[in-house]
Amino acid sequence: MDFYQSIAPYYHHIFKISQPQIDFIKAAIPENEKTILEIGCGIGTLSFELASIYQQVISIDFDAEMIVMARSNSKNNTAKTQFSQMNMLYLDANFDKNSLDGIICFGNTLVHLSSLEQVSDFLLQAKSILKSDGKLLLQIVNYDRILAQQIKELPLIENDEIKFERNYAFHSSAKLIDFNTILTVKSTHQKIENRLVLLPILQEELQQLLTETDFKNQHFYGNFLQQPFDFNSPALVVEAW
């Protein structure tokens, strides 16, 4: 069982959306009759919020179990969302050129790609399917700080239902890192352990790739409050078009 399939039943306890996140999206992509694509939608939590703002929300995730749960949740939410299992590198094959008003890729989804070449491929396809004024919104962990300081543990996520421990192990021979997690379900004391290999993208690398793929306008923030990105920022948040 892979990482996301194993944590799917507890996903809503681990990853929660915040009001600053919603406000950031609305400021970047004003409310209107717009079509939005969410990449890495998980069980659809953010998608349902977006459906209350925009005319159409198309949501994709690579993990089949996440899409099953999102579709199940959609029965109790809105018909304005459309969920599909899809690889984020196959956008060209599934969307028309110049058809989307916005693409949202949050939750560290981008670093699940395995190389900077794949990131470039994704950005090229995203630019192709966005309208001329369409926005690409990204959010990943601040790997500039993670790599420079060799930070091995991320802050604990804990509430009444779960405890989620996260740590990194660094590869010596390649620019990849292991993301190791332990999810403890408090009601049963079950422990679910997983490992993912991630591509830690630096701000300068992402900026260069955005420029090369014709995103002429780029803003980099350290959080969803749009505070400037710096070495100590918790995240790297991008608005590009």
Image: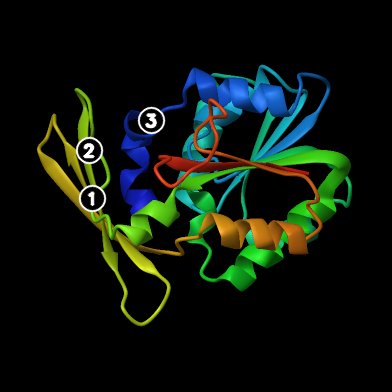
Camera-nearest residue between 149 and 74: 149
Q: Which of marks 2 and 3 is nearer the N terminus?
A: 3
Question: Going 69% across and 23% down the picture, which residue do you hit?
Answer: 27
The residue singled out by tag 2 in the image is: 156
Q: Position of residue 80 (x, y in %)?
A: 70, 25
Please state which amino acid type lies under the numbered disc 2.
Leu
Give me the C-alpha separation between circle 3 and circle 1: 22 Å
How is the model colour-coded?
rainbow
The residue singled out by tag 1 in the image is: 153
Camera-nearest residue between 236 and 108: 236
**Relative to 45, residue 88 above or below:** below
Please state which amino acid type lies under the numbered disc 1.
Glu
Q: Mark 2, mark 3: which one is toward the viewer? A: 2
Left/right placement of residue 97 relative to residue 119 reads right
Image quadrant assignment for residue 35? top right
**Relative to 80, residue 139 above or below:** below
Q: Can residue 146 be seen in this view?
A: yes
Image quadrant assignment for residue 3? bottom left
Q: Position of residue 129 (x, y in %)?
A: 82, 50
Question: Going 28% across and 60% down the picture, which residue do you hit?
Answer: 150
**Relative to 118, residue 87 above or below:** above
Q: Which of marks 3 and 1 is nearer the N terminus?
A: 3
Q: Where is residue 88 in the image (x, y as percent from the top left)?
A: 63, 57
Question: Going 81% across and 50% down the picture, which residue do you hit?
Answer: 216
Give me the C-alpha separation between circle 2 and circle 1: 8 Å
- How many C-alpha atoms fall within 10 Å of the one at disc 1: few (<14), some, or many (≥20)? some
The residue singled out by tag 3 in the image is: 12
Query: What kind of element bears circle 3?
Result: helix
Farthest bottom residue?
A: 173
Please state which amino acid type lies under the numbered disc 3.
His
